[in-house]
Image (spheres, rainbow, N blue to C red):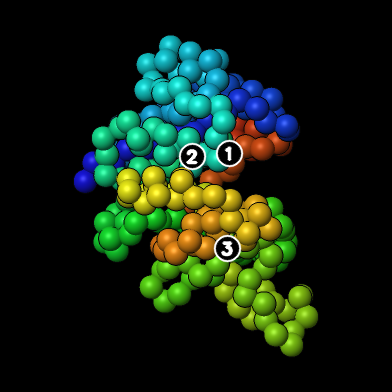
Amino acid sequence: MKVIIVIPARMHSTRLPQKPLIDLLGTSMIMRVYHQAMKVKNAHDVIVATDHDDIYNHVNAQGGHVIMTSNHHATGTDRVAEVAKTTEGDFFINIQGDEPLINPLQIEDLIGDMNRYDANIATQCTKITDQVTLFNENTVKVVRDNSNKALYFSRQAIPAVRNLSYGKWFQSATYYRHIGIYGFKKNALLAVASLPLGKLEECEKLEQLRWMENGHMIHCFETQYSTIGIDTQEDISLVVDQILKNEFS
């Protein structure tokens, strides 16, 4: 199977302007993500998909494979789908452009799980280990069936534990945090990218609910890996500290 990794990258961020080009110890954030993706053994190509000249020129100057896409896309998935329309491949892996510490083994695991389960769409999750994360609405939760298929994604804590106060939920059930990496078979990717906005998606602001509303099954595999996404200045400091730790350990 021909695997293509795509990294959507847009310039505009309300909290961190020009986020993809943030310098992390001499290397931009987007190129650190690119370099990590290039380490994936079973990937045939890694492509940055952007709508901004500065990102395009930067990646191109660094020797990376970059494609200019429309500036009208609402989501990263839409941007990946545009790349897929003109790129030969069987699996398209969408990884976040703001996770410069992503582990290549995590991506390899997702590809392997997709093959084993013959999944059309797949993503990952990890166990939530503290109550603060459980009730944080910025943390997306997922519940799954016994075959690793997602039943629902929500910003609320799910499942609810009936007849117990919120403070006791964490001790009474196992909770999973959704990890924002996706794998698609090409036909599934093009199908979900053509769907109109869904009612559940509009409520939760989670695009994967649009796919599920329209009958697309999503496999959700547990992963042992976690990473740090960069959304704030504090996140930059955490990532820089981790890079230094990795380089000198």
Q: Nearer the viewer, residue 20 or 120?
A: 120
- On the image, numbered disc 3 is attached to which residue? 153
Element under label 2?
Answer: helix
Give the residue drawn at x 41%, y 69%: 148
Mark yes or no: residue 42 visible: no
Disc number placed over residue 74 in the picture, else none: 1
The alpha-carbon separation of the residues under discs 1 and 2 comes to 7 Å
Image coords of residue 36 (percent x, y):
41, 34
Question: Which amino acid is tagged 1?
Answer: Ala
Question: Do the residues under discs 1 and 2 have CB atoms within 8 angstroms?
Answer: yes
Give the residue drawn at x 69%, y 65%: 156
- Of pointers 3 and 2, the one earlier in the residue sequence: 2
Question: Which amino acid is tagged 3?
Answer: Phe
Image coords of residue 187 (percent x, y):
32, 48
Disc number placed over residue 249 in the picture, else none: none
Relative to 24, is 38 on the left or the right?
A: left
- Of pointers 1 and 3, the one earlier in the residue sequence: 1
Whether residue 54 is situated above or below residue 148 in the rendered picture:
above
The alpha-carbon separation of the residues under discs 3 and 2 comes to 20 Å
Disc number placed over residue 78 in the picture, else none: 2
Question: Which amino acid is tagged 2?
Answer: Asp
Whether residue 73 is situated above or below residue 166 in the rendered picture:
above
Relative to 164, is 61 on the left or the right?
A: left
Residue 177 falls in image quadrant: bottom right
Mark yes or no: residue 240 visible: yes
Q: Nearer the viewer, residue 69 or 129?
A: 69
